[in-house]
């Protein structure tokens, strides 16, 4: 009989996409996907390590799953993803019934690993966990990406363009969990997106830990390797008459393709209607990215550009590679090119050594930028990171207070910015019906829009007049006009 698999995902969109790939692979092996743990033969958690809280949720959930296994010893339990890599032995220590611990780079080994678990358990008998540990790869072997696929949605799709992260932000566990950066070949990405477009998808979100360093290193060792090297290659290309990657979207030698060139290629060579991307590191976001955003019709006017702090002292300690001033300069250039661009950010409060004055600088920056939305996090020391070696010296109560203050500040600004849309027309990509039965979708600026209408509108780009706003949502009515007019 077919094995039934239950998979729960924690963390970021990269993890969501990895989970889709996992289900695609297992589906091709004959597994069926179930949405209740009780019905599963295999329970997998695709975990996140970015903050202690995310890890504790996964530990708690797997603790409950161990109870199920006591009643049903044939059950297979697996911890996958970032926590598998970051906590390795700790997982087996705290969760002795777990059979498999496999990191993000081992995702394509999963069918073999699960077969290995079955074999081990056959030999050793049921009961205890098989205790298979697979976390040693430094780079995800992208060439082994399966052709089988599974997608959670039917209108929008995630497309991973690069894996891993070469940055060394002092607080961040991701370079440890996801390994070195490696980019997928341009042609493969273009093919995947065109296939999605032909299958009826209207929007892709390009995913990577730092999409702006796309093209730095490909699996065959080519790539532009670093900013200085990229400049040198472009000069060489100009001298030898090779097409410059970023100038016109023409096919470029693979070693010269950077993220703006990739955006231009997707915009000009595929028929996808909307392109989004996440996440961007300000250090690698250049004017050429902003020009590509301005000139590519399909690229939505929205940028998530995590600033983390408004204090130069803290930014230096975080090893972010920019100052508040250079960051604001980038946004000014972007806004000159894409006037109504919507912006979002990530903020960490309570980083080691953060004083009241540092915190005020963050609030001042947020007032200056006036983001449309912001994700706010209380600093959480991650074992193995540089900052974990420093005193976590901002008291929890102060972290809470700063967290609350930033949320209130952002909520006021978000509301003011949202109100300014009332009476205006926005293009909405209608995605689904919400629990109340209303149609919902997203504007190009990434705001949720609620409207009335028939199911025919799902998957369509619909012009909508914004009637009012509540919380973080726009409410509007379709404008009676062909959807192609933007
Ligand atoms: N503590 C708190 N927040 C963190 N982030 C990353 N690491 C930590 C940490 N140790 C936040 C950053 C990042 C987002 C995904 O999570 O703001 O941009
Ligand atoms: Fe969590 Fe970061 Fe891993 Fe995504 S990459 S799952 S946010 S630790």
Image (cartoon, rainbow, N blue to C red):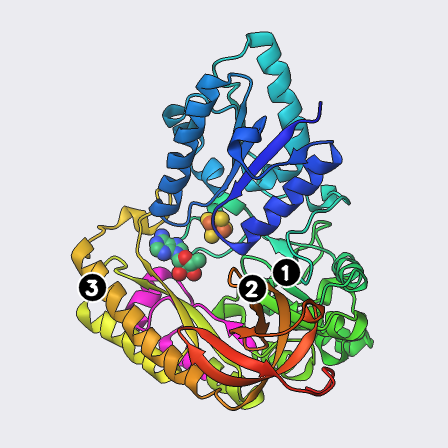
The residue singled out by tag 2 in the image is: 437
User: In what element is the residue under mark 1?
Assistant: loop
The answer to whether mark 3 is within 8 Å of ligand 1 is no
Which numbered mark, 1 or 2, is in the foreground of this view?
Answer: 2
Image location of residue 188, percent across then percent down: 77, 56
What's the magenta region?
A: 302-329
Q: Is residue 135 among the parts visible in the rendering?
A: no
> Could you say which disc has been placed on residue 401 in the image?
3
Which quadrant of the figure has residue 411? bottom left
Q: Earlier in the sequence, mark 3 or mark 1?
A: 1
The correct choice, above or below, for 174 with respect to 363 in the image is above
Image quarter in which the N terminus is found: top right
User: In what element is the residue under mark 3?
Assistant: helix
Which numbered mark, 3 or 2, is in the foreground of this view?
Answer: 2
Q: Earlier in the sequence, mark 3 or mark 2?
A: 3
Which numbered mark, 3 or 1, is in the foreground of this view?
Answer: 3
The correct choice, above or below, for 1 with respect to 391 in the image is above
User: In what element is the residue under mark 2?
Assistant: loop
Asked whether, in this view, residue 473 is left or right of residue 139, the answer is: left
Instruction: Give the Cα distance between marks 1 and 2.
Output: 45 Å
Image location of residue 319, percent across then percent down: 38, 61
Q: Is residue 138 among the parts visible in the rendering?
A: yes
Instruction: Give the Cα distance between marks 3 and 2.
Output: 38 Å
The residue singled out by tag 1 in the image is: 216
Image quarter in which the C terminus is found: bottom right
Name which residue lies at 63% across and 62% down. 206
Which quadrant of the figure has residue 26? top right
Name which residue lies at 68% across and 83% down. 295
Asked whether, in this view, residue 353 is left or right of residue 303, the answer is: left
Name which residue lies at 38% across and 84% down. 416
Ligand 1 is found in the corner quadrant, namely bottom left
């Amino acid at each position: 009989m077919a094995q039934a698999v239950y998979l729960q995902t924690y963390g970021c969109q990269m993890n969501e996409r990895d989970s889709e790939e996992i289900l695609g692979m297992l589906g091709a092996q004959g597994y069926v996907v179930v949405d209740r743990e009780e019905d599963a033969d295999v329970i997998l958690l695709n975990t996140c390590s970015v903050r202690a809280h995310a890890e504790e949720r996964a530990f708690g959930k797997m603790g409950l799953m161990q109870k199920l296994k006591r009643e049903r010893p044939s059950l297979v339990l697996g911890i996958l993803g970032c926590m598998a890599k970051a906590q390795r032995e700790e997982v087996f220590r705290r969760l002795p019934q777990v059979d498999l611990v496999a990191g993000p780079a081992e995702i394509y080994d999963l069918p073999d690993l699960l077969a290995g678990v079955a074999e081990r358990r056959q030999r050793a008998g049921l009961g205890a966990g098989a205790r298979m540990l697979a976390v040693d790869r430094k780079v995800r072997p992208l060439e082994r990406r399966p052709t089988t696929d599974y997608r959670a949605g039917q209108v929008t799709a995630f497309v991973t363009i690069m894996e891993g992260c070469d940055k060394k932000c002092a607080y961040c566990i991701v370079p440890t969990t996801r390994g070195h950066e490696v980019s997928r070949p341009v042609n493969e990405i273009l093919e995947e997106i065109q296939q999605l477009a032909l299958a009826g998808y209207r929007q892709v979100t390009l995913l990577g830990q730092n999409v702006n360093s796309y093209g730095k290193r490909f699996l065959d060792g080519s790539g532009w390797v670093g900013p200085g090297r990229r400049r040198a290659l472009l000069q060489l290309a100009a001298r030898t008459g090779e097409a410059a990657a970023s100038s016109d979207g023409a096919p470029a030698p693979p070693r010269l393709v950077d993220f703006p060139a990739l955006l231009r290629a997707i915009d000009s060579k595929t028929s996808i209607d909307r392109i989004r991307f996440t996440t961007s590191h300000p250090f690698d976001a250049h004017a050429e990215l902003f020009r590509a955003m301005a000139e590519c019709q399909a690229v939505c006017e929205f940028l998530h550009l995590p600033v983390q702090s408004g204090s130069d002292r803290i930014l230096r300690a975080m090893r972010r590679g920019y100052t508040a001033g250079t960051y604001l300069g980038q946004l000014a250039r972007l806004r000159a090119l894409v006037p109504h661009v919507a912006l979002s950010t990530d903020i960490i409060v309570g980083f080691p050594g953060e004083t009241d004055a540092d915190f005020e600088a963050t609030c001042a920056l947020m007032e200056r930028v006036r983001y449309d939305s912001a994700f706010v996090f209380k600093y959480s020391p991650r074992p193995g990171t540089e900052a974990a070696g420093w005193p976590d010296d901002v008291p929890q109560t102060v972290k809470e207070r700063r967290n609350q203050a930033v949320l209130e500040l952002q909520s006021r600004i978000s509301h003011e910015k949202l109100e300014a849309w009332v009476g205006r027309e926005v293009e909405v990509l209608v995605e689904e019906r919400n629990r109340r039965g209303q149609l919902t979708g997203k504007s190009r600026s990434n705001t949720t829009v609620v409207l009335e209408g028939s199911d025919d509108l799902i998957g369509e780009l619909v012009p909508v007049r914004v009637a009012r706003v509540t919380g973080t949502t726009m409410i509007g009515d379709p404008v009676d006009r062909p959807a192609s007019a933007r």
